[in-house]
Image (cartoon, rainbow, N blue to C red):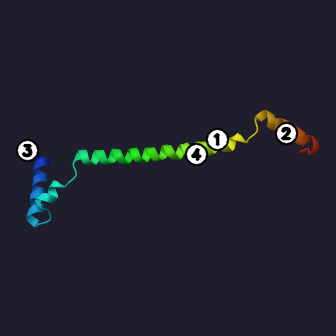
Amino acid sequence: MISKKQSLESSIIHSMKKAGFATKKDLERYATKEDVNSTVLEASDAILHGMELMFAKQNKMIEKRLKDVPSRREFNQLKVKVNKYHPVN
């Protein structure tokens, strides 16, 4: 038994053929769900891979910047020395 959706789709396709908007070859080239799903999955994989590379590069830059930052202990020792000669108050 043909569902309403299938009937509607076939009537639309028939109308397109009759009006000369689509040939049989044109209708064979329509994307299927599988085509769309595989394209979306490939695109999302490519986007995720690009984001992984971007974050890896960003992490390397952050590590490089933090390499030269003194530890809290070193900072506090330096702060005591500076405040000794240049008090804030």
Relative depth, front residue between 43 and 80:
43
Q: Earlier in the sequence, mark 3 or mark 1?
A: 3
Residue hosting label 4: 58
Whole-number angstrom distance, CA of label 1 to CA of label 2: 23 Å
Q: Earlier in the sequence, mark 1 or mark 2?
A: 1
Whole-number angstrom distance, CA of label 3 to CA of label 1: 63 Å
Image quadrant in which you'd find residue 17: bottom left
Frontmost of labels 4 and 3 is 4
Q: Quadrant of the N terminus?
A: top left
| SS of the residue under disc 1 | helix
Please give the name of the residue rendered at 22% of the width and 52% of the height, measured from the top-left corner.
31
Q: Is residue 45 left or right of residue 80?
A: left
Q: Amino acid at mark 1?
A: Glu
| Tags 1 and 2 touching, CB below 8 Å | no
| SS of the residue under disc 2 | helix
Residue hosting label 1: 63
Check residue 2 in the rendering and tell me which mark sits there, or answer none: 3
Residue hosting label 2: 78
Pinpoint residue 9: horizontal percent, then vertical percent.
Answer: 13, 52
Q: Earlier in the sequence, mark 4 or mark 3?
A: 3
Please give the name of the residue rendered at 14% of the width and 65% of the height, measured from the top-left corner.
21
Q: Amino acid at mark 2?
A: Leu
* Crowd class of label 4 (few under 14; some 14 to 19; many from 20; radius 10 Å): few
Q: Is residue 35 left or right of residue 48?
A: left
